Each structure stands twice: as C-alpha cells, then as structure tokens.
Amino acid sequence: MSNGLLAPLRRRLSLTFAGQSEGIPEWELALEKGDDAGYFAPDSVTWRVHGGMTPIVGGIRALLTQALNPGVLAGVLDHSYYREDPLARLARTIRWVFTVTYGDTVAAGRACEHVHRRHESVVGEYTDGHGDLRAYSANDPELLAWVHLAFADAFLGSYEYLRGPLPPGGADQYVREWATAGELMGVAEPPRSLAELREQLAAYDDGARLAHSPRLEEAVGFLRRLPLDPLLVPGYRTLFAAAVDSMSNRHVELLGLDRQPLRRGLLPARQGAQVTLAVVGLALGSHGPSEAAARRRLARLGLD
C-alpha cells in the first residue's frame, strides 16, 4: 500500500489517538527524558503486550469491561463530556498506559498523581445491581481495583486473542508486572497471577457490583457507534466486534450484546481485526513514538 494512500488514514488516526493530525504529541516525546529505566524493561512481558497494535482492541475491551461496574459507569456518565468529546477519555487512557509502561519512574508517578487529582471531584451516587443507592468516588479503592482488573484482563486477553498465547508463564508474568501499575494507582492487593486475576474478576460478579442497566445500554450503544471520521468507521466496527468476541461469555451477557450479529462481516471477527490492525500498523509504524522515545532514553543512560 503506497504512502500516498496511507497518508489520509495516518492523519485521521493520529488525530483520533493523539489529538493532532501532524507530528508527535509533546507528552510522548517527553518520555525520552528521565534518569532511570522505569518500571518495565524492553524485554518485559508488559512491553510485549502493550506494543504493536493490539492495545487498540484492548482499549475498547477495557472501556466495555469498566462500564459493567455501575459505580465506574456513573463517574464517566456524570462527570465527563463523552458525547461532546468522545475521544478525550480514550486519549487520556492511552497517555496514562503508555507513560506508565514506557516512562521513567518519575513520569509514571506523575501520570498516576494526575489521574488521582482528576478523580477528586468525581463523586456522586448510583444505583447498584440490587437497586440500592450507593455513594461513589472515583478514587474509592474498590472502583480503582475494578479499573485495574479491567485493564489487565483487556490488554492481556486482546493480545492473546489476536496474536496467540504467550509462552508458558507469560500471562502470569504480565499480571505480576502490571500489578505495579495497580499499586501506583492505590490498589491494595492487585492480582499477581492469571488465576488471581480471574478470581478477583469473578468476585465482583455478586449481583451488586456488576450489573446491566439502561445506563449501561446507553454507554455500550455509544461505544458501538462512536462518532468517528467516516474513513475510520468500517475499521472501528471490525475492532469493536473483535473486542466483544474476545470477552468472556459472562461479560458479554452482562453487556446485553450478542456475538453473532457482530461476527457478520467479510471476515470472522478475529481475522477481520488482524487485517484492520495490519493496515493501521502500516499507517502508524510498527513501533509507536512512546516506545521509540523510551528506547532513546535507555540508550542515553546506557541501559539499552
């Protein structure tokens, strides 16, 4: 595929993920700065899982999984301008994940502190799955823990769905490594193995903390039909279908979705997403600017 054909796609993708159509965002270039290797090394499973294009599907899956918790969902619906600026939350999520993954320890810490500060005003009330009114705060340890579980499950699950299983022990190692991100965000006991991740995810499904509701239907419907540039819509639909197809049966059921209509396309969901991400990779490059900036920092420090 020629560069001329890819250029319009590259501009639209850059605007979607970085908020600007040309150049590299300053926050990504800043990852070249710093005085240590950060929390994750280039040979870590975290770099492997968060590299490449699979985090795009992982991000969609993470947002869907987080929305299953009515407390987390209320914080998003009540305190964000997601309809007016639907990509802002995605862009903030990408910035946080990549800064913690590729930045030095100071940058990672600052990114987490920034999230905590934004969360201070995110408070209110919501109705849980039992119909009881409960207070919420975005910095509540229980909600922070669910968000962490959703991230770990989504990025690991999407990687293995699209690229195949990690080598033996790799999934456990990823969960153990990414527990550091949970601790930075104030999660008291993040899982440190795949079995613990699954156990903690299942524990939330107690009828109250995960629930289907009209508000969830609203959020899922919006995510399913995100108002994107028309050039990106077919690809996004393919990636959304793959994100749902990669999820557990229970979570798909709670979302109120049916896999079968989503699978109807020119290719099955998995293969369609693989082709779509291959095109995205051609447009954006196999290694993102965050990873490239981190490698320059490591080379400067003699740690590459």
Image (spheres, rainbow, N blue to C red):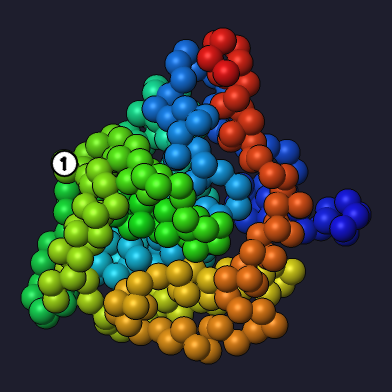
Q: Quadrant of residue 133?
A: bottom left
Residue 189, percent from left and from top: 17, 43
Mark 1 Cα-neighbour bin, 10 Å: few <14, some 14–19, many ≥20: some
Residue depicted at 32% across the width and 82% down the height: 253
Q: Position of residue 9 (x, y in %)?
A: 77, 58
Name the spot of residue 168 as percent of width and height, x first.
40, 47
Question: In front here: 225 or 159?
Answer: 159
Check the image and report above or below for 215 versus 124: below
Q: Is residue 188 left or right of residue 286?
A: left
Eyeballing the image, is 96 above or below 9? above
Q: Position of residue 260 (x, y in %)?
A: 50, 88
45 or 258, nearer to the observer: 45
> What residue is shown at x 46% (from left), y 20% (from top)?
37
Query: Dot 1 lies on which element?
Result: loop
Work out which quarter of the rendered image holds the C terminus and state it: top right
Residue at mark 1: 188
| Identity, as a three-letter code, of the amino acid under mark 1 | Ala
Count of numbered marks: 1
Q: Quadrant of residue 274?
A: bottom right
Would you say residue 143 is visible in this rendering? no
* Residue 61 shows in the view: yes
- Quarter in which the N terminus is drawn: bottom right
Viewer-side residue, 230 vs 31: 31
Residue at 47%, 56% in the rendered image: 165
Q: Does 235 sit left or right of 50 as displayed?
A: right
